[in-house]
Image (tube, rainbow, N blue to C red):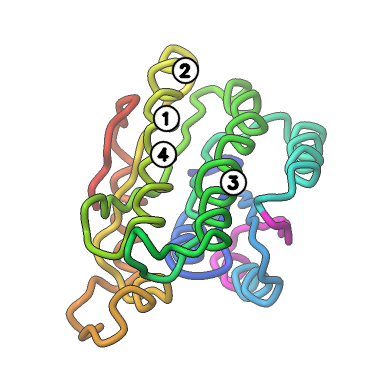
């Protein structure tokens, strides 16, 4: 990972935070995007403790103009992105399909689908400028599970868009999925509030698995199961 520019979206907590910290090190520069300033500052401290460097981008992924400014700033300063890890997500409350509140569904669409597409527009040119640009999109397939309709539908749409991008860009960059194991994240706690969290995979362990897996070749369109 030395001398690489790594962009992590959704980096202030959970798997995004742990992965950004694990990917950091000597010579690596992490660009961390999230809404939560406090979480980003904690990440910055953790990355610098590992000898890495970070640039914090406190930004909502639904801010189209902000994403465009970020892309221009990255190009002007570093000229490329070597690796993009996308973990930002909206998890609407569980609900039967016929009772999903419109505002919750629209927010999930805005974050999980539209914002992802806008990020692809911004980041794709930067990845093409890298010697071996790679994008990893965190997946979580809950299609068919009861009460997960809004979350599952929007994540499925994101996955379909990512797979199409992977096929289209295969000769220029590598686009793949990454599927973390069940982890004790705040996101999972919303879906399974009474779950025994001690039986889940520690978040840092999942992040370490990702770093180890990236030492091996990744095929376009591959789904990396950690």
Q: Report the mark closest to the observer, 3 or 2.
A: 2
Numbered label attached to residue 169: 2
Of 52 and 156, nearer the camera is 156
Q: Position of residue 176 (x, y in %)?
A: 37, 34
Residue at the spot of label 4: 157
Q: Residue furthest top?
A: 171
Quick one: label 4, few (<14), some, or many (20+) residues within 10 Å?
some
Q: Specify which label sits upstream in the sequence, 1 or 3.
A: 3
Q: Secondary structure at mark 4?
A: helix
The disc label shown at residue 53, or none: none
Which dot, 4 or 2, sits closer to the camera?
A: 4
Indicate the quadrant where residue 52 lies.
bottom right
Residue annotated with mark 3: 7
Q: Which residue is mark 1?
A: 175
Q: Earlier in the sequence, mark 3 or mark 2?
A: 3
**Whether label 2 touches label 1, CB < 8 Å:** yes
Q: Is residue 55 magenta?
A: yes
Q: Residue furthest front?
A: 98
User: In 3D space, how far apart are the residues under numbered discs 1 and 3 (Cα atoms)?
Assistant: 14 Å
Give the image location of residue 85, x and y in percent: 49, 46
* Label located before the other in sequence (4 or 3): 3
Distance, label 2 to label 1, CA atoms, is 8 Å
Identify the magenta region: 46-60
């Amino acid at each position: 990972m030395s001398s690489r520019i790594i962009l992590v979206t959704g980096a202030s907590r959970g798997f995004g935070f742990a992965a950004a910290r694990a990917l950091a090190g000597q010579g690596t520069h992490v660009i961390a995007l999230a809404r939560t300033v406090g979480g980003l500052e904690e990440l910055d401290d953790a990355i610098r403790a590992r000898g890495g460097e970070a640039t914090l981008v406190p930004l909502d992924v639904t801010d189209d103009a902000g994403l465009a400014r970020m892309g221009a700033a990255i190009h002007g300063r570093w000229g490329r992105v070597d690796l993009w890890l996308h973990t930002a997500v909206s998890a609407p409350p569980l609900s039967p399909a016929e009772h999903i509140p419109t505002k919750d569904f629209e927010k999930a669409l805005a974050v999980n689908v539209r914002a992802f597409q806008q990020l692809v527009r911004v980041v794709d040119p930067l990845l093409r400028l890298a010697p071996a640009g790679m994008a990893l999109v965190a997946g979580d397939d809950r299609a068919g599970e009861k009460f997960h309709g809004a979350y599952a539908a929007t994540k499925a749409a994101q996955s379909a868009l990512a797979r199409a991008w992977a096929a289209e860009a295969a000769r220029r960059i590598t686009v793949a999925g990454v599927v973390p194991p069940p982890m004790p994240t705040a996101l999972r706690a919303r879906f399974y509030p009474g779950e025994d969290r001690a039986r889940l995979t520690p978040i840092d362990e999942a992040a370490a698995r990702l770093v180890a897996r990236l030492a091996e070749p990744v095929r376009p369109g591959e789904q990396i199961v950690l």
